[in-house]
Amino acid sequence: EPEVTQTPSHQVTQMGQEVILRCVPISNHLYFYWYRQILGQKVEFLVSFYNNEISEKSEIFDDQFSVERPDGSNFTLKIRSTKLEDSAMYFCASNRGAGLQETQYFGPGTRLLVL
Amino acid sequence: GESVGLHLPTLSVQEGDNSIINCAYSNSASDYFIWYKQESGKGPQFIIDIRSNMDKRQGQRVTVLLNKTVKHLSLQIAATQPGDSAVYFCAQPQGSSNTGKLIFGQGTTLQVKP
């Protein structure tokens, strides 16, 4: 069964450093998403991406964040200068598209710890 | 603003019993609701979904009930097993499309006692 994959599973970084979180969405999916989950809290939307551009972003997704689909399979989230409060689980998700009876499928997540 | 909320943060059941996890929502514009299961250290896993033109949908050992009058949905798990122990989230796309951002509830932790 196809699934969303994410690397790395864990990332530890120093405050102020740049991190890139990587995702490989399900191959025939067209919509891509990043969510985050701070420990013990609910999953929060960060950004959605379709047709090589951002379709929606949340207030959390400020200028320190960027997303990219560098090739036909990868989807990345970059945090340019990490802050302590960026420590969280980051989940990538993908979806085939509007009008289809299918929800968003999530990857296993990357646990980011900013020291 | 829109919100999706769960009634109980923790539910403890005996193995073999049925579990009922509840969720309330405020956004009537979206006609699509999803239940996710999240095991420790893993990503949310799709369980079952339902559209607002239905009141009930059944899967394998799971049933989702939707009451649009009171804006409430529930997830019923039959014959709960230890492997069902996880956090359960209800989620709702913002807007009428299933490609919109998902709004998640706070989650209910289901604990299954052997």
Image (cartoon, helix red, strand yellow):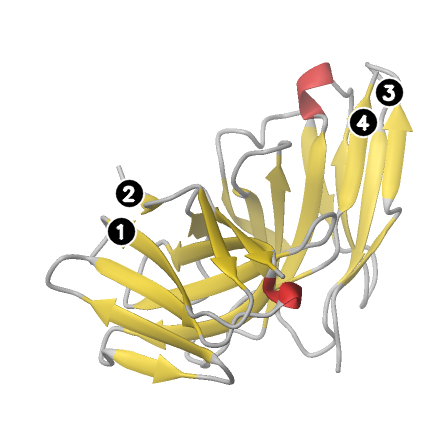
Measure how far apart labels 3 and 2 are at the Cα level.
Answer: 34 Å
Measure how far apart labels 4 and 1 are at the Cα level.
Answer: 32 Å
Image: B42 above or below B98: above
Residue linked to disc 4: A113
Task: Identify residue type, mark 3.
Answer: Gln
Image: B114 above or below A26: above
Residue linked to disc 1: B25
The label number, if any, that marks residue B2 in the structure image: 2
Q: Residue at x 65, y 73 (%)?
A: A29
Measure how far apart labels 2 and 4 are at the Cα level.
Answer: 30 Å
Measure how far apart labels 4 and 3 are at the Cα level.
Answer: 12 Å
Residue contact at pointers 2 and 1, CB within 8 angstroms: yes
Task: Identify residue type, mark 1.
Answer: Tyr
Question: Marks 3 and 1: which is nearer the front?
Answer: 1
Tag 2, which chain?
B
Residue linked to disc 3: A17
Task: Say if labels 3 and 1 share a chain.
Answer: no
